[in-house]
Image (cartoon, helix red, strand yellow):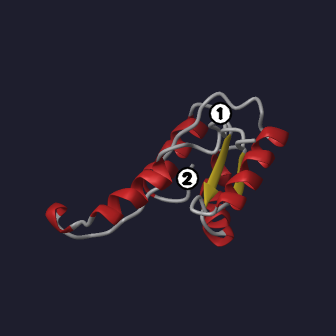
Amino acid sequence: MGGTSGMGLAIARHVLDAAGSVVVTGRTPSGAEDATAALADSGRVTALAADLNDADAVERLRADLAKDHADAALLVNAAGVFAPKPFVDHPYADYDRYQALNGPSPSSPRPSPAT
């Protein structure tokens, strides 16, 4: 998750260099498309857009991955939130946001609703 820039994009490039194929995800369609364009000369790339802060978007992403990429052998969670400020200036809400984004992955099983 999060393959449109930074570490995620670099890892996607390494996977392609090793003759693998990649599915990059990004928060916006334009970011996912830009990553695909940057990587396309290196191998087979699929781009999917999903805001991982949106539960419905995550569920759609899970469904797309299960339908078209169930044979995936590697998940790299490189989605990120960047809040440039000194460590001691981060309120607890920042850490809650980081955990919400990077905690359960879209491939994690979701608990069944209570009955």
Which of disc 2 and disc 1 is earlier in sequence? 2
> Depth check: 107 or 31 in front?
107
Please tell me whether residue 29 is drawn above or below residue 60 in the rendered image: below
| Residue pointed to by mark 1 | 20
In the visual, does 20 lie left or right of 12? right
Q: Quadrant of residue 75?
A: top right
Q: Is residue 79 in sight in this rendering?
A: no
Separation of marks 1 and 2 at Cα, in angstroms: 15 Å
In the visual, does 94 lie left or right of 25? left
> Depth check: 33 or 53 in front?
53
Instruction: Say what amino acid the circle numbered 1 marks.
Output: Gly
Image x and y of residue 70, in percent: 77, 33
Q: Quadrant of residue 83?
A: bottom left
| Residue pointed to by mark 2 | 3
Instruction: Say what amino acid the circle numbered 2 marks.
Output: Gly
Residue 7's disc is none
Q: Quadrant of residue 12?
A: top right
